[in-house]
Image (cartoon, rainbow, N blue to C red):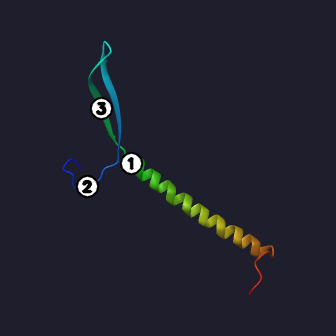
Amino acid sequence: MPDGSGHRDSIATYAPDIQDGVVHGMFVHVADAGLLKAKELERERVIAERDAAAVKVRMLAGIRLGRCAPHA
């Protein structure tokens, strides 16, 4: 946040203002990336759920085919 009290995800692009080979300043564009970050976190959650489901499916397929580990 502008007052330093929080956190905000953003993407910044910096481009120098060059005139006759001399840098006179810099153009800065900053964009809010909060929605992008939220979508990334959602994607990670969905992938983790998919992977957990795949493990269960492989385990159940092994049981159904009689390939489960012997009891100790």
Q: Nearer the viewer, mark 1 or mark 2?
A: 2
Q: Residue at x 75, y 86 (%)?
A: 71
Q: Is residue 36 above or below residue 27?
A: below
Label 2 to label 3, Cα distance in Å?
A: 22 Å
Label 3 to label 1, Cα distance in Å?
A: 21 Å
Label 2 near label 1: C-beta < 8 Å? no
Q: Is residue 16 above or below residue 56?
A: above
**Residue 28: which numbered mark, if any?**
3
Q: Is residue 22 above or below residue 39?
A: above
Q: Is residue 29 left or right of residue 45?
A: left
Q: Earlier in the sequence, mark 3 or mark 1?
A: 3
Q: Position of residue 57 (x, y in %)?
A: 68, 68
Q: Quadrant of residue 41?
A: bottom left
Q: Residues within 10 Å of mark 2 (few under 14, many from 20)?
A: few
The residue that label 2 is drawn on is 6
Q: Quadrant of residue 66?
A: bottom right
Task: Pick the residue in front: 16 or 10.
Answer: 16
**Residue 48: which numbered mark, if any?**
none
Task: Pick the residue in front: 11 or 42.
Answer: 11
Q: Residue at x 70, y 72 (%)?
A: 59
Farthest-out residue, bottom: 72
